[in-house]
Image (spheres, helix red, strand yellow):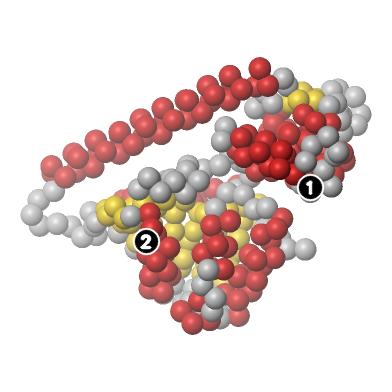
Amino acid sequence: MLKPQIDEETFQKWIDAMTQFGLTTNQAKVYVAIRYLGTTTVSPVANFSSVRREDVYRILPKLNEMGLIERTLETPSRFRAVPLETVLPELLRVKREESERKLSDLETIAEDLLNKSESISTQIDEENHGLLSVLPHSISPEKSSEMVKRTEKELISFSNARRYTQFFSARPGYLEETSPRNINHRVIFAEVSDELLPIIDKISKNMFSLGNTVEIKVYNDAPEPCFYLISDRREALLDASENGDEKQLILWTDNKKIIDLLLQHFEKHWTTSDTLTFS
């Protein structure tokens, strides 16, 4: 239950605002809870924010590192929020630097692609070059569906948990009717909220019942700017949009070099992510 001094609508507005500055949903909930509680300990924060105590313990050092909260030296430690007039300019600076880095990365990729296009001979090496296609945002779910159907051995996904569950929820019977059999499905979610756990549990059990191996992990650091789906290490769908912004471009590729880079990114995060467990 939320405290009397803040209603659900106001609380959600705070969460929505803080996530725009790069916080995850749970990080925003914990920060807003501390703002409203004043100097406080872990238990009140967990009760106020509806975030599990173990998650609160993991989030607090990150918020402290980001300069959003301060921690006392007593035992048990208490926490208080840094004033907004101090926090917001720093968050803006970080977001500005992230945007500049992202733009710089895109410029580098664009320059590299242009250089490759100039050096490609008429005898195209399909294995190394392949295609890189721009897709309308609206057909991204159907492209994902086609890739899943074509999968023979392995399906890899770095995904947003909410969009992942929405995909399957919007397609009743999809797994039973069209899901491939006997594949290894590995997923990393950038974040998982408690209300999505039963849905994810049901999806994974359905896939497992069809003879598939399902492994799910959660990446608890800052949100990633890009989500992707890789089928049999032969094709990939990339979504670099923020919050599903329809103005952003969706990319499909069977370019081996691009897929190899995505696989390196996935394996790096796989080793440092936490295995998702269902109570």
Number of numbered labels in the structure image: 2
Where residue 171 sits: x, y (%)?
A: 51, 72
Q: Is residue 247 visible?
A: yes
Name the quadrant containing residue 15. top right
Q: Is residue 234 left or right of residue 122?
A: right
* Kind of residue sitting beneath label 1: Ser
Q: Residue at x 73, y 63 (%)?
A: 278
Question: In the image, 125: left or right of 179?
Answer: left
Q: Nearer the viewer, residue 179 or 169?
A: 169
| Residue ID for mark 2 | 139
Question: Percent from the top left, x then y, of residue 147?
Answer: 39, 68
Q: Residues within 10 Å of mark 1 (few under 14, many from 20)?
A: some
Residue in the picture at 63% in, 34% down: 18
Q: Is residue 23 above or below residue 143?
A: above
Q: Nearer the viewer, residue 172 or 39?
A: 172
Identify whether 17 is placed above or below 248. Answer: above
Which amino acid lies under the numbered mark 2 shown in the image of this protein? Ile
- The quadrant in which residue 140 appears is bottom left
Q: Secondary structure at mark 2?
A: helix
Direction left: furthest residue: 122
Q: Secondary structure at mark 1?
A: loop
Residue placed under numbered mark 1 in the picture? 50
Up/down of 30 relative to 159, above or below: above
Report the Cα–Cα distance between label 2 and label 1.
35 Å
Residue at coordinates 75% horizontally, 44% vertically from top-left? 8
Asked whether residue 23 appears in the rendered view, the answer is no
**Quadrant, the C terminus:** bottom right
Q: Position of residue 263 (x, y in %)?
A: 43, 53
